[in-house]
Image (cartoon, rainbow, N blue to C red):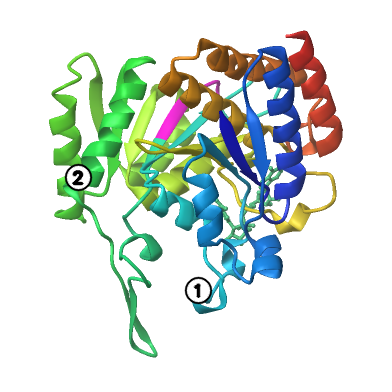
Amino acid sequence: MKIVVLPGDGIGPETMAVAVAVLETAAQRFNLDLTLEHDLAGHASLKVHGATVTEDLLAKVLPADGLMLGPMSTYDFKDESKGEINPSKFFRKRLDLFANIRPARTFPGIPTISRPFELVVVRENTEGFYADRNVESGNSEILVTPDVAISLRRITRACCERVARSAFEIAMQRRRRLTLVHKHNVLKITDGIFLDACHRVGKDFPEVEVDDEIVDAMMAHVVRNPARFDVIVTTNMFGDILSDLTAELSGSLGLGGSLNAGANHAMGQAAHGSAPDIASQDLANPFSQVVSAAMLLAWLSQRSGHAQYLLASRAIETAMEQCIAEQQVTRDIGGRLGTRAVGQALVRCLREA
Ligand code: NAD
């Protein structure tokens, strides 16, 4: 198996270094035939190649088995004609990574404002309100006059059905409960298509209990009682916002791992951004990137049938739980260690796992 590793911007090189050490240790420990191929994306690539991502890089990623992408300073990238392309969008679109799977759970050793919970947000990843994902090229925001702008939200039955199917499949492996999150009371046509597509796909999964919530009320419900939810499926922007909330409720955005999965490709990428406020200070929580790596290994196992990859994925999660239980964690979740020291502790726990 070959995984391409792109560390990204801000805290990306620090957190990705930990994820790489964990993947290398897991490969040794579980005899995985795993090669990591390192390359550049984001500011580092812009300096060297004049673009944040290139077609040459895509040509390396396409035949690989998986991709690990670090967080990107997306806000800095404003002009595609100057090579400032949003790398997350680039890979989500070009690899057709339609389901963004974002688990969130509490751990006994991490202080939270919330009662214990364990859930997964499945977010549609290729259309919705994100202007750069709605059109073949360019941007689907329109400046009508200097003071009037229009942003379009694209919803298609095909994209809703495929993300719904992913969510039902995940629900079948868990507590078999799926919540559809929408704003159908106002966005009647677009969220009408979303809900209808989900219910149609649901006919293939009669064992899964389905309910739905309006997105604004959902924020209150998830804060009040997140344990009520198992799997949640929603459109792009609602899922982006909701999953940052569930990660933070679990203790920190620095715990928010995610997998961007399509039919043929998958990309592990932390849910958060490049966190410039703490970059290069050895403060970043690497768990989000590590969880993303574990999710990628589980996806590779499912695709290839190699059980060792699933064992390695579970061992990484166990090593993380052990670090948390021993308080070998970063400050955002109540510890005293830096990013590098947490990485060393994780590698030690994984060797012993
Ligand atoms: P952010 O997610 O980078 O940071 C929000 C807050 O969470 C900050 O206080 C940060 O210190 C903290 N945080 C994030 N990750 C952490 C970690 N691993 N450990 C400890 N604390 C962590 O959001 P932002 O500051 O609004 O955005 C910064 C940049 O990231 C912007 O350019 C934005 O466009 C970009 N962004 C990229 C992605 C992505 O690449 N997928 C996602 C969101 C934002």
The residues tagged by marks 1 and 2 sit, at their Cα atoms, a distance apart of 28 Å
Residue 118 visible, this angle = no
Q: Which image quarter: residue 121?
A: top left
Out of 213 and 344, give the one closest to the viewer: 344
- Left or right side of 211 for 98: right
Q: In this view, does 8 lie above or below 239?
A: below
Is residue 116 magenta-colored? yes
Q: Residue type at mark 1?
A: Glu
Out of 150 and 39, give the one closest to the viewer: 39
Residue 53 x, y percent position in the rendering: 56, 61
Q: Is residue 103 above or below residue 205?
A: below
Mark 1, residue position: 80
The magenta region covers: 115-121
Residue at 37%, 71% in the rendered image: 139
Mark 2, residue position: 158
Residue 84 x, y percent position in the rendering: 56, 70
